Image (tube, helix red, strand yellow):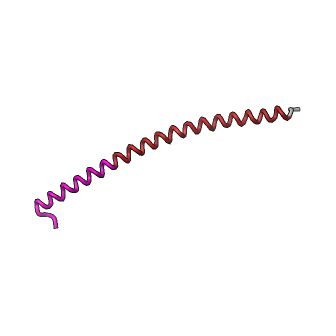
Amino acid sequence: MVEPDNLVLEQLRALRGENAKMMNWMQTMRAEMTAMRQFMAGMITIQEHDHIDIAGIKLRLDRIEKRLELAD
C-alpha cells in the first residue's frame, strides 16, 4: 500500500510537471504575441504613410483640376 505522504508527493510532482509545461507554453505564446504586436505596429506605420501619400495626391489633383478649369 502507498503511504499518504508519498501519494501527496506524487501528486505534487505531477502538478510541478504540468506547471512546467504550462510555463513553457506561456513563454511561447508571449513570444508570439510580441511578434504579432511588432507586425501590427509596422502595418499601422505603413497605413499611416499611405494615408499621407493619398492626401498629397488628392491635393495635387485638386490643383491640377483648378488649373485646367475642370473643378466645379
Q: Which residue sits furthest left?
A: 68
Please tell me whether residue 56 belongs to the stretch shown in magenta. yes
Percent of width and height locating residue 31: 51, 37
The image shows residue 7, relative to residue 47, as above or below, that is above
The image shows residue 44, relative to residue 16, as above or below, that is below
Residue 38 lies in quadrant: top left
Residue 3 lies in quadrant: top right
Percent of width and height locating residue 69: 11, 63
Q: Which residue occupies the foreground of this view, 2 or 34? A: 34
Quadrant showing the C terminus: bottom left
Left/right of residue 68 with respect to residue 49 in the rendered view: left
Left/right of residue 6 with respect to residue 63 in the rendered view: right
Considering the whole magenta stretch, tell me its main secondary structure.
Answer: helix
Q: Which residue sits furthest bottom?
A: 72
Quadrant showing the N terminus: top right
Q: Which residue sits furthest right?
A: 1
Left/right of residue 21 with respect to residue 41 in the rendered view: right
Percent of width and height locating residue 47: 34, 49
Residue at (20, 56) in percent of width and height: 59
Percent of width and height locating residue 18: 68, 36
Residue at (13, 61) in percent of width and height: 66
Range covered by the magenta-colored residues: 48-72
Residue at (42, 45) in percent of width and height: 40
Q: How many marks?
A: 0
Please tell me whether residue 11 belongs to the stretch shown in magenta. no
Residue at (64, 35) in percent of width and height: 21
